[in-house]
Amino acid sequence: MRVAVSWSGGKDAALALESVRDEYEMDSLLTNFSENGRSKMHGVRRSLIEKQADAVGLPLRQVVVPEGASNEDYEESMTAALSDLYDDGVDAVVFGDVFLEDVREYREEMTPDRLDTLFPLWGEDTDLLAERLRRDYRAVTVCVSDSLGAEYLGESYDEGFVRSLPDTVDPCGENGEFHTFVADAPYFRRSVEYETGEVVRRESGGTVCHYCDIVPSEVSMPEGKPTSDAPTDYQR
């Protein structure tokens, strides 16, 4: 089976890729971006996602969604991109979701019937996943919900970070409390070096999130602004 990985650049996608990379034929990573060059969900610079793809050794398929697009426009763009996957010989799309039934159902509904959907992390204990992340990966928080607080931005995902989380917060942020950027993983050919930058606050659909810009270590020029303007997103 030939598969593509829905790739946000964060911990869930990275763990899912590790889970399937030796079992299936790997085709590509699939990421959606805003026109300003940022990933839709996490607000990460395109150049950093490209560096991840290079470190993984897979092509990056990019879906560009216009700024201010409606959710219907967004879904139309993603459906077209997924249909292209099938036309290019891809059999299934891999997702990193663990337990949110509504999110899984949304992904399955969005994916054309011709493609299978794979959820290799589904039902796993997030405490054990968090342990794997702390031990084997290097990640940084790039987006947090207003309920968690901006003070958690730009933090390394390590034992100290997990211990500092409120008891009500899932250690993998599976309820959307925080999102990460993975700078290194066991299967990366090289790490992705970065520096933390500006912090911004964004509101979309009544939800407030805080974003921390991360910048490739050799780059100091601005590249858009961290933002997420899709009410519902195909990737996490």
Image: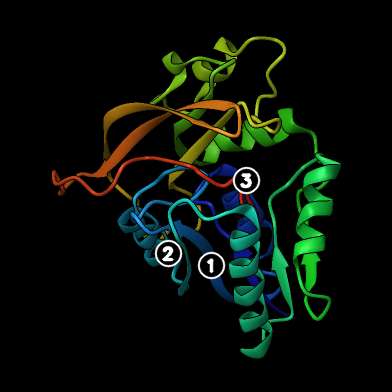
Identify residue type, mark 3.
Asp
x and y percentages locating residue 200 in the rendered image: 35, 27
* Element at label 3: helix
x and y percentages locating residue 212 in the rendered image: 36, 31
Please name the residue shown 58% across and 19% down the image. 162
CB under 8 Å between discs 2 and 3: no
Return the residue at label 3.
12
Q: In this view of the protein, can residue 123 be seen by the observer?
A: no
Q: Earlier in the sequence, mark 2 or mark 3?
A: 3
Please name the residue shown 83% across and 76% down the image. 113
Task: Please say if 128 is above or below 55.
Answer: above
Whole-number angstrom distance, CA of label 1 to CA of label 2: 7 Å
* Element at label 2: helix
Whole-number angstrom distance, CA of label 2 to CA of label 3: 15 Å
Q: Is residue 125 left or right of residue 31?
A: right
Count of residue discs: 3
Return the residue at label 1.
29
Return the residue at label 2.
53
Q: In this view of the protein, can residue 156 be seen by the observer?
A: yes
